[in-house]
Image (cartoon, helix red, strand yellow):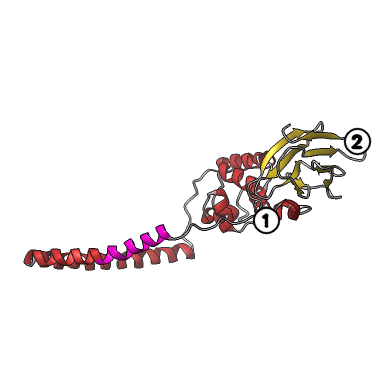
Amino acid sequence: MPQTLPAEYRDLVGDLRQLKDRSRLSLTELGRTTAISKSSWERYLNAKQFPPRHAVQALCRAAQVSEEAVLPRWERADAAWNRRGHTTSPAEPGPDQITAHRDCDVDDRESRANRSFGYRALLAASALITARPWATTAAVLLLCTAMLAPAAIIHASYKTAPAAAARPPICRLGSCEGRDPLTTACEDPVTVGSRTAADGTRLEIRLSPSCQAGWVRSWPTHRGFRIEITSPDGHAQPATAPTALPTAGEMVTTAMIAAAHATGLQCCYYPSAGQPGRECFTAGS
């Protein structure tokens, strides 16, 4: 990134790149997921264009990271960018600018030549219509018929073709048991229960109806904490924070657990070894 950019802006772009890596999506997939074009993401992630707030929020959702962890940095970068302004002092044109001007001159000459050719073609067509109006009309009708017939055939084939089958989930129920929810493409999760612990940790029970599996996600994280999700039959899937301090905004999830519905799913949170006790809640809370 250019060193002339405000430090807050460079920090924001670094965070966005980490979120994109966390989402494990290509630029094309990210464009489809966020309804923001691939070319726009390329400009945002390479500091060619300042990212709007809604793009940062969409990337947080794609990476399953809390917006509250990223938006303050976006606000600081936005303020620094606005202070910087958008006017620059005149400077001598560089090699790239000179090349661009030359390319524009070539394009302009080609455009004038194309316009001249088009003008001559229009004159010739006008003379032909004036001399033979009926023959010209018949020729135009035949040409239109020849162009529309293939389009009608293709349209009819689309209407009679069978609908494409929906993509099946990668896993379901028991086959999802113990798997990482970030790698299973269970793309329809909903939050069926949530709580903010006494120490400020946010906890959410998530359920994918298509995969029929649930898990817990938690943020912000800290050293020594533990979370687990328990199914109605009493077995649990845990998750423990890494031994090193997690980075700001990092989210921790439990492994997946088979759950045909939300009823009976329970999350328990253990703050740390130095803080005995636990906080539990069920789906629907």
Q: What residue appears at the point 55 percent right and 53 percent down from the top-left corner?
A: 31
Where does the N terminus fall, quadrant-wise?
A: bottom right
Closer to the camera in the image, 18 or 125: 125
From this viewpoint, is residue 47 visible? no
- Whole-angstrom CA distance, mark 2 to mark 1, is 34 Å
Residue 95, horizontal then vertical, whole percent: 48, 65
The disc placed on residue 224 is: none
- Magenta-span inclusion, residue 69: no
Q: Does residue 152 belong to the magenta stretch?
A: yes
- Residue at point 68% right, 39% down? 191
Q: Amino acid at mark 2?
A: Gln
Q: Amino acid at mark 1?
A: Asp
The residue depicted at 14 percent of the width and 68 percent of the height is 124
> Is 162 on the left or on the right of 269, as rendered?
left
| Image quarter in which the C terminus is found | top right
User: Closer to the camera, 225 or 114?
Assistant: 225
Can the viewer see residue 57?
yes
Q: Which mark is residue 275?
A: 2
Give left or right: position of 139 versus 238: left
The x and y percentages for residue 221 are 79, 42
177 or 71: which is nearer to us?
A: 177
Tell me which segment is drawn in magenta.
Answer: 146-160
The x, y position of residue 23, in whole percent, is 66, 53
Residue 93 in the image: above or below residue 66:
below
Q: Which of 54/138 is in front? A: 138
As drawn, is 219 to the left or to the right of 155? right
Q: For residue 21, which numbered disc appears in the image?
A: 1
- When the figure is inspected, residue 36 is found, relative to residue 107, above or below; the finding is above
Q: Secondary structure at mark 2?
A: loop
The answer to whether the residues at label 2 and label 1 have Cβ atoms under 8 Å apart is no
Q: In the shown orientation, is residue 56 left or right of residue 160? A: right
